[in-house]
Amino acid sequence: MFIEAKKINKVYFDKNDKPNTVLKDIDLSIQKGEFVSILGPSGCGKSTLLSMIAGLVSSTSGVIIVDGKKVVKPGKDRGMVFQQAALFPWMNVTENVMFPLRKEMSKKDGLERAHHFLKMVQLSNYPSHYPHELSGGMQQRVSIARSLAMDPAVLLMDEPFGALDEQTRSRLHGQLEEIWIDTKKTIVFVTHSISESIKLSDRIIVMGTRPGTILTDITVDIPRPREQHRQEIAALEEQIMALLKTEIDKVIDEEQAYEAGS
Amino acid sequence: MKPAVKRIIFFAALIVFWELGSRFELWHETILPSPVSVYDSLVAGFADLTLVYDLIASFRRLLIGLVAAVIIGTGIGILLARSKTADETLGTLVLALQSVPSIVWLPLAMMWFGLGEGSIIFVVILGGTFVMILNVRTGIKNVDPLFIKAARTMGSNGLDLFIKVIIPASVPYFVTGARLAWAFAWRALMAGELLSSGPGLGYTLRYASDFGNMSLVIGVMIIIGVVGAIVDLMIFQRIEKNVLKRWGLET
């Protein structure tokens, strides 16, 4: 297996020192080149799990192995795209994309490489623009180019299109799919949108909440491009919706119980 | 109407009112000299180069003091932001000292550095340093955690992360700190010069006052105000605006 998570547990202690289990006994394996979505309601720990693969958050117990190496800290083998583009505002587009490259190659090679990946996200006409001059969708594309430029083994995406409007999101879905086919990267994509996960991924890991566990692992075998298979998409959507409904009810019940109790 | 036009009309009206008040003797010339006599004393002051030497001397002190304040302030600010122990100890001292007007240090400074340049520059440095420290500290502590996370996933950490990401991300606070440091230093300089030996704008102001030359007193006050406004508007506000725009903090 390319990415393997074994018996991952994560427990936070709140301010009253009460333990709060965010992730419970997560086992997960992902193959090289797969596009896997992690889907779940808010608070299920899906972003925490992704941050653990990135090495930004440590687990309470369990190990994560990526490409045969145990994850202990962040590294360039795992690129991450966040919900916010997280571009550095004091650098222009090209400088941002070159940020992860500056130590490992000459400026000339870095420029060439930045240009290549900006072209891939169709932004090669904006090399000297500053982030504040770009729309949210363009910023997110620069952010994707920046991650790809360091040629990571895995691309981790944490609700990357969550803050964008519907049209932009839909266009970026298409672009991301093309990039994935071109580069054959392994992509782990966190989302709370059922349709987004069906549209993009080979496999959908559905997570439940309180504590965060894996409910089911669905293989999506709808042929691409998927827009042409509306019926299959709708059927799968309903199936996942039913699964998540009990989870969402659980969250609402708990919130109501909390409010009634307070 | 354009702001510039409004401004010109406002100031013209103010000067006309002032001049008319003097002409009709609403107040006596020794209490508030007319704009014409203020203008005359300014012209005389520039003609015999006193005010030119004063400006040069004042700016020299200000520049030395401000540069030192920005450097010391940045250094201590970084220290307070990075070390919890320093913040809990030295940080409290800085907060306490910041509320002390720097001019009250002058008697001590005169004991340490004598009556001349040294003690004025010391007071100017103190005037600018504390506000610089506090702004740099806040800037570094307020760096968006997302920038740090993103940089770490791109293989940056330790000193590289600090120099390439944290410092540039806190530049807006740095610029605001420098602007406030200039404002405080300029006030401290004038206060210091009033109480010590010349040349300098503050010194000439006191000298004119000792000889009852109220029109020169007002003339120097106007120079102090105009220089302050010009430096703030033309230099600091302009830089601050550009930085805030670039850093996406203002649209």
Image (cartoon, coloured by chain):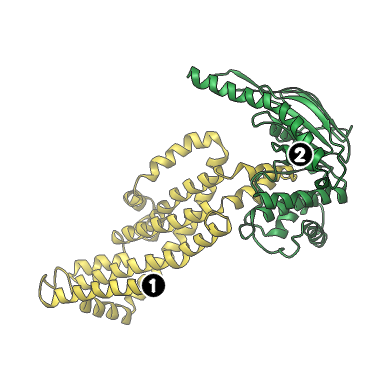
Chain colours: A green, B yellow
Q: CA distance from mark 2 to mark 1?
A: 55 Å
Does the rendering let one see residue B196? yes
Residue at image position (75%, 44%) is B155
The residue wearing badge 2 is A197
| Label 2 residue SS | helix
Measuring from the top left, give residue B104's x and y in whole percent.
Answer: 32, 49
Q: In the image, which disc is placed on residue B199?
A: none
Q: Which mark is residue B2?
A: 1
Task: Give the residue type that dot 2 points to.
Answer: Ser
Above or below A259: residue A179 = below
Q: Residue at x 78, y 31 (%)?
A: A205
Residue B199 at least partly seen: no
| Side of A181 where B10 appears, left or right | left
- Classify mark 2: residues with Cα within 10 Å, few (<14), some (14-19) or many (20+): many
Q: Residue at x 86, y 46 (%)?
A: A224
**Mark 2 — on which chain does it sit?**
A
